[in-house]
Amino acid sequence: MEKSRGVLIAGNWKMNQNLAETESFFKALSARCEQLRFSKKLRVCLFPPVLSLFRAKETVDQNPGLGPIALGAQNAHWEKKGAFTGEVSGPMLHEIGIEWVLVGHSERRQFFGETDETVRKRAESLLTQGFHVILCVGETQSERESGKTYEVLSRQIHEGFPSVSEELLSRLIFAYEPVWAIGTGLTATPVQAEEVHEQIRKLLEHRTNHSFAQKTPILYGGSVTPENIDSLLDCAHVDGALVGGASLKVDSFTALIQAGIKVLN
Ligand code: PGA
């Protein structure tokens, strides 16, 4: 299938995998990756918790088989240093060779008071510092049931959108993650996902311009598994997946990568 924006398979480990589990995951993944045929159009990135991220980076650097695997942090502050207990900064991530960051995940919005404004500040600062940023948006079940999906996405995109140059925006990726589908086993159907991805692309076009909207990847997230990923990736506006649970096991994560390879062939 023609995927002009390529495909990105991203794994969000959330607060899972200690140091030993991280090391054994990446060693096993290295052996699997050696058997796979990666193309330039396929990007793969894993987001371990910040402590495990350091061990992951060491393991990736020591195993040539892991060359195609990028690593990212699940969050980072907009300031470069200072009195921000519990946060991690862009320069700290750069120091260990990390180039990707997730911002605005619904769990950060829901449990840690993240707002569209703080999402925008993080995205702006991190893009300016040279990171690839995946900005997550998505409606809750009650918002969907009351017909507010478009309104919520429109607010999240307009208020969370980073005001930086178009050049920096080329490292911005969106992830549509309906909150009702995260960790619930309830995946959006390909029709539902495609409909919302198209709406997001229109919102991006209003916010910027046609060419930016056409070039920006939009990932789907929410109970993606090796069983349902093919039908999601078959949607023209779905440019990859942001996966929680199924990214924790080498077998299932490898199967997700294989689905990315397959759809590009
Ligand atoms: P899930 O999580 O795949 O376990 O539903 C997705 C996410 O929260 O990014």
Image: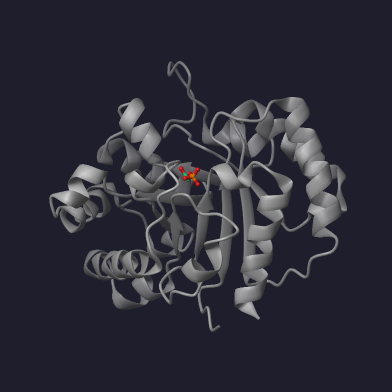
Give the camera-side residue of 113 and 231. 231
In this rendering, is residue 203 above or below 131? below
Residue 239: image location, x then y, percent: 48, 67
Query: Where the N terminus falls, by quadrant?
Result: bottom right
**What's the residue at 36%, 54% (across, down)?**
164
Q: Residue furthest left?
A: 146
The answer to whether residue 151 of the structure is visible from this angle is yes
Q: Is residue 143 toward the left or the right of residue 52 in the image?
A: left
Residue 125: image location, x then y, percent: 42, 42
In this rendering, is residue 87 above or below 65? above
The answer to whether residue 99 of the structure is visible from this angle is no
Q: Is residue 192 toward the left or the right of residue 232 in the image?
A: left
**What's the residue at 66%, 52% (across, down)?**
253
**What's the residue at 44%, 50% (across, down)?**
222
Query: Where the C terminus falls, by quadrant?
Result: bottom right
Give the camera-side residue of 13 and 87. 13
Residue 129: image location, x then y, percent: 50, 45
Q: Is residue 117 toward the left or the right of residue 213 in the image?
A: left
Colouring: one colour
Residue 264: image location, x then y, percent: 62, 77
